[in-house]
Amino acid sequence: MIRLKVERLPGDRDPKPVWLWSSATAAAPADVDRWWQVFLRRFDLEHTFRLMKQTLGWTAPKVRHADTADLWTWLIIAAHTQLRLARPLAEDLRRPWERPAAPRRLTPARVRRGFRNVRATTARPAAAPKPSRPGPGRPAGSKNRHRARHHDVGKTVKRAESIKEHQAQRC
């Protein structure tokens, strides 16, 4: 257990000690220094995971295999990296209640909103797609490997079987 004592807080508030836990048996002062710095950066990590889940749809697909989940995670990480790299190029398409932000201080969600303007200004190394016909479909005799859609029915409420029972319950 590590006890951190804050010397002062803004606004003359009373600082309370912060307790951190570590499984290391012997901790050097450099280790403790690193741990409290990581503790302070935890909000960055929490907001990154929130962005990946809510904005980029990390948990949206219901994948059935661990390999597929790993690939999806790497795809989300690549998308997050692209949003970070596109930050200086993106316009701030803010909502009416949001404050204006400097171009280098845009959040990844705001960069995503302005990404359509970034795509229009960047070079396109690939040629235009050629028109194509629909594919041949699944070969005859092979099994369908796609999972059937499952709609949640929801919870049903137990109702009275007759009008007299219903009226008796109301009284």
Image (cartoon, rainbow, N blue to C red):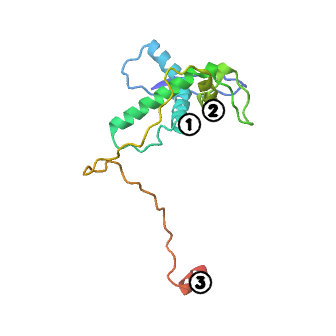
User: SS class of the residue under badge 3?
Assistant: helix
- Which of discs 1 and 2 lies nearer the camera? The answer is 2
Q: Which of marks 3 and 2 is nearer the N terminus?
A: 2
Evaluate whether residue 20 shows in this view.
no
Q: In this view, does 95 lie to the left or right of 119?
A: right
Residue under label 1, please give it: 55
Residue under label 2, please give it: 113
- Which of discs 3 and 2 lies nearer the camera? The answer is 2
Of the residues shown, which amino acid type is indicated by label 1? Answer: Thr
Which residue is painted at 62% across and 27% down in the image?
Answer: 107
Residue under label 3, please give it: 167
Q: Which of 9 and 55 is in front in this view?
A: 55
Circle 1/circle 2 CB separation < 8 Å: no
**In the rendered view, would you say 164 is above or below 87?**
below
Of the residues shown, which amino acid type is indicated by label 2? Answer: Arg
Q: Which of 92 and 27 is in front in this view?
A: 92
Whole-Å distance between the Cαs marked 3 and 2? 55 Å
Please identify the quadrant where the C terminus is shown: bottom right
Please identify the quadrant where the N terminus is shown: top left
**Whole-percent x, y for residue 54 in the image:** 54, 39
Whole-Å distance between the Cαs marked 1 and 3? 49 Å
Whole-Å distance between the Cαs marked 1 and 2? 10 Å
- Number of residues whose C-alpha sits closer than 10 Å to that of mark 3, classed few (under 14), some (14–19) or many (20 or more): few
**In the rendered view, would you say 84 is above or below 168?**
above
- Number of residues whose C-alpha sits closer than 10 Å to that of mark 1, classed few (under 14), some (14–19) or many (20 or more): few
**Whole-percent x, y for residue 93 in the image:** 69, 31
Q: Which of marks 1 and 2 is nearer the N terminus?
A: 1
Q: Which of marks 1 and 3 is nearer the N terminus?
A: 1
**Whole-percent x, y for residue 11 in the image:** 73, 25
Q: In this view, does 84 lie to the left or right of 117?
A: left
